[in-house]
Image (cartoon, grey):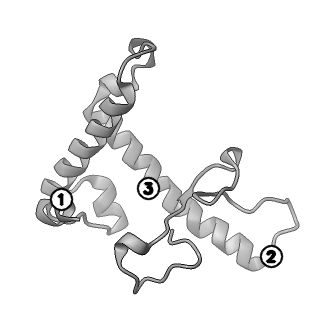
Amino acid sequence: MIQMGSDEGDPHEHWFFQIYGDSAYGVSPVMVSPYSGVGELTVAQWDWNAAMGQVWISVEHGFGLVFQDWPYLNASWKQVWGTACGVWYQVGVLLTNAHSCLMPNQTAIWYGCMPPSLQEYFHD
């Protein structure tokens, strides 16, 4: 999601992005959550929650792809304190993205969001 104050015509390096997540994560300059309040939401808020909920599912599929390709990253009992598990996860995401650029995955096909070529992916 492009944060308010940014425009799609701005250069990519000037965009401000926000991550959409579960309401348990709260709201911050980089994180947004669904509107809450049972029976108190406007139609626009309900529509926004529904639209973002569909996108959120595709993000969860992305996490699943990383863990499917790199099962060690999902084995928390093997991740001991002091290991570079954060770096391992970043490498797993990078390699999964590169693999998806070469061979589009089912999530990309289902949502009609085809990944860029590797040249485009690594150019930015």
Image coordinates of residue 5 in percent, x first then y, are 57, 79
Q: Is residue 105 left or right of residue 13?
A: left
Residue 111: percent from the left, percent from the top?
37, 65
Q: Amino acid at mark 3?
A: Ser
Identify the element where label 1 is drawn: helix
| Cα–Cα span, label 3 and label 1 | 22 Å
Q: Quadrant of residue 113?
A: bottom left
Taking 75 as reference, is 70 above or below it?
below
Report the residue marked by disc 3. Answer: 58
- Residue beneath the point at 25% across and 50% down: 97
The label number, if any, that marks residue 42 in the structure image: 2
Q: Which residue is mark 1?
A: 122
Estimate the x, y position of residue 88 in percent, counting from the top left. Answer: 30, 30
**Residue 74 image position (x, y, % from top left):** 39, 26
- Assess disc 2: are there few (<14), some (14-19) or many (≥20) residues with their C-alpha within 10 Å of its C-alpha: few
Label 1 Cα crowd, 10 Å radius (few <14 / some 14-19 / many 20+): few
Residue that sits furthest to the bottom in the current view? 9
Q: Earlier in the sequence, mark 1 or mark 2?
A: 2
